[in-house]
Structures are given as C-alpha cells and as structure tokens.
Amino acid sequence: MVMYFDFWRELRESAWFFSHNPEIVLPALPPAFLMALANHLVWRRSLSWITAFFQWGVSVIFVMLGILCGFLALGFIVVMTWDAEHRERVNFSRAWRIMAPRFLEVFVASLLVGFLVSFFSAFFVFPGLLLGFLLMFVLPAVIIEREDPFSAIRHSFQMSFENLGECFTFLVIVLFFGVVGYLVFWLFGFVPLGGIVVNTVIGGAILAYVSIFLTRFYLVLSRF
C-alpha cells in the first residue's frame, strides 16, 4: 500500500511533462471535437421540435463515439507517458509499436469501461462515480501489465481498494478538472463555430493532462 503520495508534486510534474511534450494532446483532440460538436448541438436553438429532436439524437451518437474515442486516446497517452518516463520526449511511432499488439484488448477494455461508466453516470449518478473510481486503472493495467480486460478490471478494483485514500483524492482532483471542462463547454456552447474550436482545444488539453496524471499515479502505486 502507498503510505504517501505527493499530489501537488505529481500535478506539477505532469504539467511539466505536458508543456515539454505538447504534441501528446493530438490523440485527445478527436474525442474532444466529438464532445464539443455534441455540446454545440444541444445548446443550439431550434425552430421546430423535429429539428430539436434530430439534434439531440445526433448529439447522443457523438457523445457515445466521443466517450469510446476518449478511452482509446487515454490508452494511447498512457503508452506515450509510460514509454517516455525515462526519455526526454514522446515518440508516436514507438508508442504505436507498443500499443498495436494490444489494440484489441485496449479497444474491448475501452468499450467495457466506457459503457459501464457512461450508462450508470447517465441514469444513476453515484454508481457511475463509484464505477469510475473502481475502474480508473483498467487501461494502464491492460497496457503496462499486459493483462486481458477482465483481469485488468479485477486488478483495478484491487488497487483502488488497497489505496483507498489516495484514489479518492485522485478522483476529487479529476472531478475538479471535469467540472472546469463542463463549465468551459457550457460557456462556449452558445458560440457558433468558434466555440467548437475552443472547446476542442481546451477539452483535448484537459483529457491529455488527466491521462498523463493518471499514468504517473498508476506507476507510483504499482511500485509499492
């Protein structure tokens, strides 16, 4: 069990790593764009109920695709952060060579975790948060430990329970970033095309930063 985890230091180190490797945001931009587009459709005013119904339906599809792509982006950023832990810069081709043999497992894990967390968050808020708390280490376990998705789920449950205090603090920090992202999306959701661009960039940056922070957090916990 981890006796102490310096969150402030790791937040600063994650920010330093991100600032020195800004290209790491690229995998996070597609899911951020899908979520920004969905947000734009939700807040855009419609002249008729059928147009509004169509916009909501399309936005739901974009949200589902955005969640799946978001977990895939998380997996790729986990690879890059893990690979670059003892290197000065990330390398996309090297990261892809590491991830490619595990892509099917990463895709299945992303599908499972994305469905469970999004479904329970949409209909039962607290169970969704609880599942997000318990499943936060699934993708790092699949990639770093080379586990299958179901073994990674058990691994994530075990690690979360064994490091309950640290994981709860981590969840609170991630929720803070989530609230900031939601407020930004809401604010720029009323702006036409420019809002989509701004939300894509900011959303991608938040997703990339949280992914780096999660990877570093997992690597520290796994050493104890």
Image: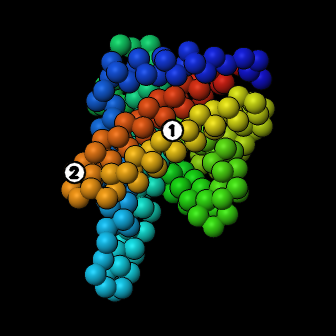
* Residue 119 in picture, x, y percent from top left: 59, 64
Residue name at image x 63 percent, y 67 percent: 123
The reply, left or right, for residue 160 in relation to residue 95 is: right
Residue farthest to the left?
Answer: 193
Q: Relative to 40, say whether 150 is above or below.
A: above
- In the image, 192 versus 215, the foreground residue is 192
Residue 177's disc is: 1
How much space separates mark 1 and mark 2, taking CA atoms?
Answer: 22 Å
Q: Considering only vertical position in the picture, is 93 above or below 41?
A: above
Q: Position of residue 120 (x, y in %)?
A: 64, 62
Look at label 2 and name its amino acid: Gly
Does the image show residue 21? Answer: yes
Question: Is disc 1 placed on a helix, strand or loop?
Answer: helix
Residue drawn at the location 70% of the way across and 36% of the way down: 168
**Residue at which label 2 appears:** 194
Q: Residue at x 58, y 42 (%)?
A: 175
For marks 1 and 2 on the same chain, the one whose residue lies earlier in the sequence:
1
Disc 1: CA contacts within 10 A as few (<14), some (14-19) or many (>=20): some
Q: Amino acid at mark 1?
A: Phe
For disc 2, the neighbor class at 10 Å (few under 14, some 14 to 19, many from 20) is few
Give 97 or 115, whichever is nearer the viewer: 115
